[in-house]
Amino acid sequence: MRSGIHPNYRPVVFQDTSTDFSILTKSTVETNETIVWEDGNEYPLSKAELTSASHPFYTGQMKIVDTAGRVERFEKRYGASRRRS
């Protein structure tokens, strides 16, 4: 392999921000935060808003997630009532 062209593939902890669910897996995601895992080692931390622990398909509960006002920005940009007749 050529050096310098491949992303850093390493263990990373993904943490669901709405539940206490966390998983340690390998990824190339870039993060600035770290966390001490159950084995006592420190790993990079990536926070996720939706995982299998909080997604309505897996939990059976409907939950509306509006990240940073996306719905409001859409309605502001395209109008609240742009419906076809």
Image: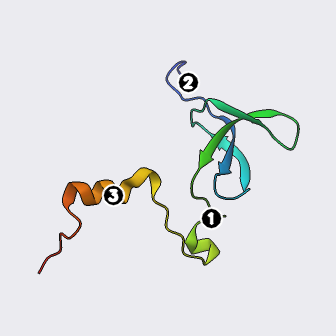
Mark on residue 72? 3
Examine the rendered structure and indicate whether residue 11 appears above or below residue 74.
above
Q: Nearer the viewer, mark 1 or mark 2?
A: 1
Confirm or deny contact between disc 3 and disc 2 (CB under 8 A): no
Confirm or deny contact between disc 1 and disc 3 (CB under 8 A): no
Secondary structure of residue under mark 2: loop
Is 71 positioned to the left or the right of 3 in the image? left
Along the viewing direction, whichever of 13 and 33 lies nearer the viewer: 33
Is 53 positioned to the left or the right of 56 in the image? right
Mark on residue 54? 1
Q: Position of residue 21 (x, y in %)?
A: 72, 56
Taking the spot 11% from the left edge, 81% from the top edge, the residue there is 85
Examine the rendered structure and indicate whether residue 43 appears above or below residue 17.
above
Q: Say what amino acid the circle numbered 3 marks.
A: Glu
Tell me which corner region of the image, top left, top right, bottom left or bottom right, holds residue 26. top right
Tell me which corner region of the image, top left, top right, bottom left or bottom right, holds residue 45. top right
